[in-house]
Amino acid sequence: MWVRFPSRHLSLLALLVLPSVAAAEGALSPRLQMRNVALAAKAEAVRVSTTVPTTLTFDMPINAGAAVLSDGTRVEILDRGERSLTLRALEELREPVTLRVPLPDASAQAAPLFQLSTPGDVVDAQVRVFREASAPELLRVRLAELEARCAVCEAALAAQRERGATKGPADWVLSRQVEDGGVAVARLHSSRQDHAANVRVKFATRFLAAEWVVFQARVANATGKPWRPGRAWLEDAVTGQRVAARAVRFAPAAPLHGDAGRVVVEFGWTAGNSSGTYRLVVEAASGGASLVIPDVALQDGTPVGE
């Protein structure tokens, strides 16, 4: 049986129950987020969950009693307020469920539509809905979001400039890129490498410091064409989540058929990062064969020196 709370308390309640939900679900617990949207002609996508309620809060009165779901057997409305609706999925949704929310001064055909789905990895715990994209409060919220993103970009740019200014070991130590733990070096081995691939690894080495990890690989190129690396990322072998490389280097510039080049890929890393297994993927700059190194572990391998 569900206990009914006033609608203004439901969003806070959802956030308060998050720790217990996360403890029950473990690593698979969805990530909660709050979104701000403006009504549009097309249906707005909303991500819901079977464990955490989702609250839609409107900046205008709604006809909550007339709100209707296309399938009330898979999603239920927990609370109907003057300007809010709180709902929860009863099961994982293989197909989206449509929610229609009539407005007092609009026809039924003009009622806002929401497409509900259960992606599993993220839940819209609260969605603030604005009638106009030019609503002052929505503009203020979006301006604050842009300012926050700019601050993150500026901090990342400053860090990149600081790293770019380091020229040698003294600068590495001064900038704390290398600390007391030094740099741990390990030879990586993979029994699942595709030895028939046109671009493959002869051997790979991992260099691990306090705030970064660098992979170096000798690459055999059997494509018959010059090969250069483009983008690179680490891909979690379990979740598929990607971590983009912050630097990719290559020498020689264009290895000949059968010759080996040397690829070096850098990632940001701290001791608190996951120590799971990843795939290292380096795309070809020309769109050709990618370099793939499976079974990459951030803390395992054969030590070759420190």
Image (cartoon, rainbow, N blue to C red):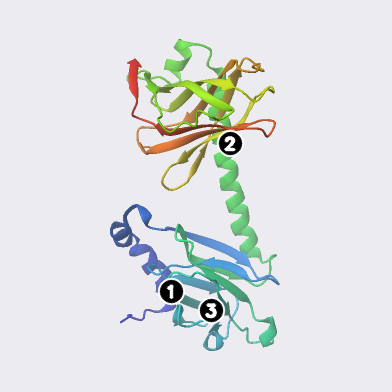
Residue closer to the observer: 172 or 139:
172
Residue 225: image location, x then y, percent: 69, 23
Closer to the N terminus: mark 1 or mark 3? Answer: 3
Q: Secondary structure at mark 2?
A: helix
Residue at image point 38% right, 31% down: 298
- Callout 2 touching callout 1 (CB < 8 Å): no
Relative height, residue 85 to residue 270 (above, below): below
Q: Indicate the secondary structure of the residue bearing disc 1.
A: strand
Q: Is residue 201 above or below residue 65?
A: above
Res 1 → quadrant: bottom left
State the count of labels.
3
CA distance separating discs 2 and 1:
39 Å
The residue pinned by badge 3 equals 83
Q: Is residue 77 left or right of residue 70?
A: left
Q: Which residue is identified by label 1?
A: 88
- 274 over 216 or under it: above or below: below
Mark 3 belongs to which amino acid? Arg
The residue that label 2 is drawn on is 154
Which amino acid lies under the numbered mark 2 shown in the image of this protein? Glu
Q: Residues within 10 Å of mark 3 (few under 14, many from 20)?
A: some
Taking the view exactly as shown, the residue that stands out farthest to the front is: 196
| Sooner in the amino-acid sequence: mark 2 or mark 1 | 1
Label 3 to label 2, Cα distance in Å? 38 Å
What mark, if any, has residue 3 been given in the picture?
none
